[in-house]
Amino acid sequence: VQLVESGGGLVQAGGSLRVSCAASGSIATISSMRWYRQAPGKERELVASISTDDSTNYADSVKGRFTISRDNAKNTMYLQMNSLKPEDTAVYLCYAYILPLGRGWNNFWGQGTQVTVSS
């Protein structure tokens, strides 16, 4: 099982980006999924989470600007980021709690995708 992020890049302040996280491998089911971010010299920060019933939570710093969603048929999670600010610049990492086929529940992380917002 692996998670692969995509969609990061460079954008001007006020712009938008959508990052994706695709889970692949022998997966029985995926429970909660989350987006984290980590900027240089800062601790990893939980940005948004989504549960199996599509209930969501957001960090105060991104409420009203970011939207998390998931497509269970594709084992994919998305983060739509609007009204981006320079302080949103970070590596964005996805996390999922997954039950692989024939194994127990476990935590999985992606490798991260860089999002850079220029002023």
Image (spheres, grey):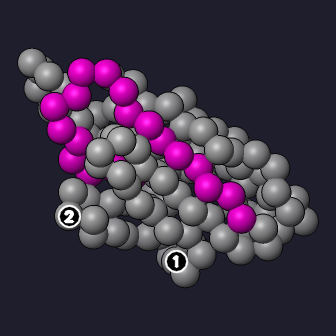
Return the x and y of residue 22 as percentages of the image width and height.
44, 37
Distance of label 1 from label 2 (alpha carbons): 20 Å
Q: Amino acid at mark 2?
A: Asp
Number of the label disc, if any, that sits on residue 63: 1
Residue at image location 36% in from the left, 27% down from the top: 24
Can residue 91 be seen here? The reply is no
Q: Which residue is mark 2?
A: 53
Asked which quadrant contains residue 54, the reply is bottom left
Please tell me which residue lies in front, 9 or 95. 9
Circle 2 crowding by C-alpha within 10 Å: few under 14, some 14–19, many from 20: few
Pick the quarter of the image with the C terminus: bottom right
Relative to 6, is 35 on the left or the right?
left
Residue at image location 65% in from the left, 44% down from the top: 7
Q: In the orientation shown, which residue stands out farthest toward the front?
A: 73
* Secondary element at tag 2: loop
Return the x and y of residue 32 as percentages of the image width and height.
26, 51
Whether residue 4 is situated above or below residue 102 in the rendered picture: below
Which residues fall within the magenta stretch? 16-34
Q: Amino acid at mark 1?
A: Lys
Pick the quarter of the image with the N terminus: top left
Can residue 13 be seen here? The reply is yes
